[in-house]
Image (spheres, coloured by chain):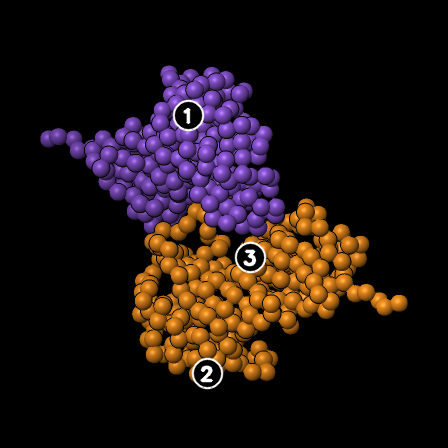
Chain colours: A orange, B purple
Amino acid sequence: MAVVRVTTRLDLEYDGTAFAGWARQPGLRTVESELMGALATLLGGAVALTVAGRTDRGVHARGQVVSYEGPPAEVAALNAVLPHDLVVRSSRTAPEGFDARNDAVARGYCYRVLARREPSAFTRTTELWWPRVLDRELLHACAALLPGTHDFTAFTPAGGGYVHLRRTVLDARWEEDGDRAAFWIEAESFLRHMNRTLVGTMLDVAGGRRSLDSFAALLKGAARAQAGPTADPRGLCLESVRYPA
Amino acid sequence: MAVVRVTTRLDLEYDGTAFAGWARQPGLRTVESELMGALATLLGGAVALTVAGRTDRGVHARGQVVSYEGPPAEVAALNAVLPHDLVVRSSRTAPEGFDARNDAVARGYCYRVLARREPSAFTRTTELWWPRVLDRELLHACAALLPGTHDFTAFTPAGGGYVHLRRTVLDARWEEDGDRAAFWIEAESFLRHMNRTLVGTMLDVAGGRRSLDSFAALLKGAARAQAGPTADPRGLCLESVRYPA
């Protein structure tokens, strides 16, 4: 008789503020460790998790996807044992062998900026407060340069151990809503800190501290020191993961 | 020589979660006491505050207005001494004698509902999570009954000491955005708990536990016990205050 393996797909959202990122680390409160604990409680044993997009400390997710070998637990039961800042949106059987990381064809992130003189009483941990000069047209011009395949060496810490540093951006744009600006980007995959460093460098351009041409030149490959600062993690959120239909 | 009185107008936003409401109370953390403390620090003496809309424990504000007799403090200086959940949006000289409460001609509130099976990792303190049945058409039908002058006795605790219990609603509507529903209402003034009890009663109608006709009948005056529950304060936010042009 054939052994039937069951693969489960989980869709998650979490407020990353109080987590030390996704990945399990001894003594730290991470998304992976909280989720593994809840699943162990409900399934009666530990499961190994595969995640679509590892997020750093303080980074949020609205559309994170996780897979594991084992049966699904009920959404309501999971949310009853999970902490308030980690919510399971769905839990269901996936095609056998589904792999949340390797099967993903694209990830979508959003970086949110509040551009006004006063901070917000509500979104201090989910938006970057930016009381400085911000030229919206220059933001749009930067984003327009991103779709396509580029060498993003300048936008990730040196020594990351990547085999290659080219990545393909499928879509990138800034959306405005009053004093809010949000950078939406979808790519097949990302380098570590790539989104946050892109945003930090675009804010340099929009603040007049760097030219648009210099931003364009960075996309051809350059040392990390040539790009701008890594923007604060609080503004970043993994919004969606795409899989083949 | 005439004495020159200076009146200041402050526009505020606050996350009401950690406040025991607006009004100063001994030993409690309230919006009024935090703001008075900051102003005393910057102005070198205490000022008496007049507020457009007193908010209860847990209720938020994005467009609260306050007046006092005295000079304005700088916005940046105020925000530097205020806690993170209380932000001054503007601070400026108003016409002499401006009174934030008595001069207001309308107040606008919004009550936000998240209508889905799973809670939110992000908005637990600013939206009401409603995983139950919610008929959107019945919500709209309820809101359509509200504009005009009605007797809201059923929607406020008995013994509130009001001279009269009729109030004039200028506008009321539910706006939908995916699994979110938001009740926007503007009135000249409100009774205590009126918005939250309107929402609690409309949720009864939208959940099939009360008829639309019975909701309509409540607007002609009825005992408090005839209306529905007082909805949780976390969903409510004072959005705007209107003054004569």
Above/below status of B76 relative to A159:
above
Confirm whether residue B34 shows in the render.
no
Is the residue at mark 1 from the same chain as the one at mark 3? no
Tell me how far mark 2 sits from mark 1, CA to CA: 63 Å
Would residue A236 appear left or right of B188 to someone viewing this image? right
> Residue A97 is drawn in which quadrant?
bottom right
Residue under numbered circle 2: A221
Confirm whether residue B99 shows in the render.
yes
Q: Chain letter for mark 1, please.
A: B
Q: Position of residue A82 (x, y in %)?
A: 67, 50
> Residue A19 is drawn in which quadrant?
bottom right
* Residue B160 vs residue A93, the one in the foreground: A93
SS category of the residue bearing label 2: loop
Quarter occupied by the N terminus of chain B: top left
Identify which amino acid the numbered label 2 is placed on.
Answer: Gly
Q: How crowded is mark 2: few (under 14 residues within 10 Å), some or many (20 or more)?
A: some
* Residue A200 vs residue A103, the one in the foreground: A103
* Residue A145 vs residue B233, the one in the foreground: A145
Label pair 2/3, CB-CB below 8 angstroms: no
Closer to us: mark 2 or mark 1?
Answer: 1
Q: Position of residue A169 (x, y in %)?
A: 48, 74
Q: Where is residue A148 in the image (x, y as percent from the top left)?
A: 46, 78
Identify which amino acid the numbered label 1 is placed on.
Answer: Leu
Question: Residue visible at 50% across and 69% down?
Answer: A186
Closer to us: mark 2 or mark 3?
Answer: 3
Q: How crowded is mark 1: few (under 14 residues within 10 Å), some or many (20 or more)?
A: some
SS category of the residue bearing label 3: strand
Identify which amino acid the numbered label 3 is placed on.
Answer: Arg
Residue under numbered circle 3: A62
Residue under numbered circle 1: B191
